[in-house]
Image: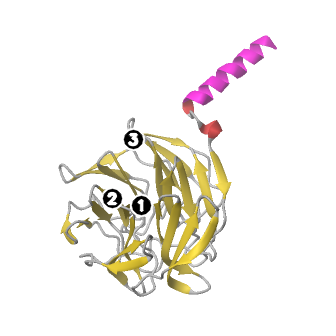
């Protein structure tokens, strides 16, 4: 019995080494979105999250803006967006200086719209249009700019064709666009997160409309892309959140909705497996706040869900 106990302790130590902190990870179910929604823009300012536009099976594409209060765990409506109803907005955190930027999407055809929402005045402003019209791109904020990556011209949902390699930079101070080095390969429905002055992108769909597991990092100092360790699971339409040096790629689609939560360690260029999301889904929105990752809405395309779940790494 003593020897068995020793082996159990050794095994427990090995598990701790392989997945440090996994025991502490939790998911919490929060107040659902008032209407099932997918493909919307999501951002956060202070203790509030904001969703804008998106698709609901009851109304189709919309221009609704909603606010979720983290403190009260409740939702309220805000001023609607100015442009035509749309969904499949560029995925990623596009908040800057207390403003939410909403980029591209689709409304029967791919769009190049750029708009900014001010939650203090509850007003919208239309800004310079993006050079490349596209749906399901990825986006990330670097300093005073927003980088928009990949996307597609197809408007029939995830992996619907026309994957793009275009990468464009929006200068917030001058309200102008410029072209950056393209992705190593065309990708749509990919995920992105900014960290340490670089932008990391994960998965998506290739030109054959198939989910992939490759990942790349963009260095703005050299305007170049490099390959990094591939994800364990090929998928598109996932979201990426972060805490410290760790990036959490959550959910997605690969012939069906996924609950996968895979962790990329930036400093070691390695992957591990985290606690799966309670509600499998894709085309969600997410925001990292206070050491937690909020994942809102999603679905498979055309069958949206109202799930609002918070992950504590």
x 41%, y 87%: residue: 84
Q: Is residue 311 left or right of residue 197?
A: right
Q: Residue furthest top?
A: 2
x 27%, y 75%: residue: 130
Q: Earlier in the sequence, mark 2 or mark 3?
A: 2
State which region is magenta.
Answer: 1-17
Labelled pair 2, 3 in contact (Cβ < 8 Å): no
Q: Quadrant of the N terminus?
A: top right
Distance (Cα) linking label 2 and label 3: 18 Å
Q: Nearer the viewer, residue 246 or 95?
A: 95
Q: Which mark is residue 266?
A: 3
Q: Which residue is mark 1?
A: 93
Q: Nearer the viewer, residue 176 or 258?
A: 176
x 47%, y 82%: residue: 80
Labelled pair 1, 3 in contact (Cβ < 8 Å): no
Q: Quadrant of the C terminus?
A: top right
Distance (Cα) linking label 2 and label 1: 7 Å
Question: How many numbered discs, if any?
Answer: 3
Vertically, is 241 above or below 40? above
Q: Which residue is mark 2?
A: 141
Labelled pair 2, 1 in contact (Cβ < 8 Å): yes
């Amino acid at each position: 019995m003593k020897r068995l106990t020793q082996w159990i302790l050794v095994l427990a130590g090995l598990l701790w080494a392989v997945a440090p902190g996994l025991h502490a990870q939790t998911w919490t179910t929060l107040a659902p979105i008032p209407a099932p929604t997918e493909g919307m823009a999501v951002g956060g300012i202070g203790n509030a999250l904001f969703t804008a536009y998106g698709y609901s099976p009851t109304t189709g594409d919309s221009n609704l803006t909603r606010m979720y209060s983290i403190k009260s765990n409740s939702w309220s409506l805000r001023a609607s967006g100015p442009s035509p109803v749309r969904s499949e907005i560029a995925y990623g955190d596009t908040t800057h200086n207390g403003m939410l930027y909403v980029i591209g999407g689709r409304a029967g055809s791919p769009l190049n719209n750029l708009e900014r929402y001010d939650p203090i005045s509850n007003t919208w402003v239309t800004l310079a249009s993006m050079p490349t019209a596209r749906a399901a791109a990825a986006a990330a904020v670097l300093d005073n700019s927003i980088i928009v990556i990949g996307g597609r011209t197809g408007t029939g949902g995830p992996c619907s064709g026309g994957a793009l390699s275009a990468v464009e930079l929006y200068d917030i101070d001058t309200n102008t666009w410029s072209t950056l080095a393209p992705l190593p390969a065309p990708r749509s429905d990919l995920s992105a997160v900014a960290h340490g002055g670089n932008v990391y992108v994960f998965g998506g769909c290739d030109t054959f409309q198939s989910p992939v597991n490759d990942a790349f990092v963009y260095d703005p100092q050299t305007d170049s892309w490099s390959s990094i360790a591939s994800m364990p699971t090929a998928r598109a339409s996932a979201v990426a959140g972060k805490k410290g040096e760790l990036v959490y790629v959550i959910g997605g689609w690969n012939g069906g909705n996924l609950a996968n939560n895979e962790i990329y360690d930036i400093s070691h260029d390695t992957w591990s497996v985290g606690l799966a999301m309670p509600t499998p889904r894709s085309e969600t929105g997410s925001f990292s706040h206070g050491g937690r990752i909020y994942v809102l809405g999603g679905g498979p395309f055309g069958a949206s869900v109202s799930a609002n779940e918070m992950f504590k790494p």
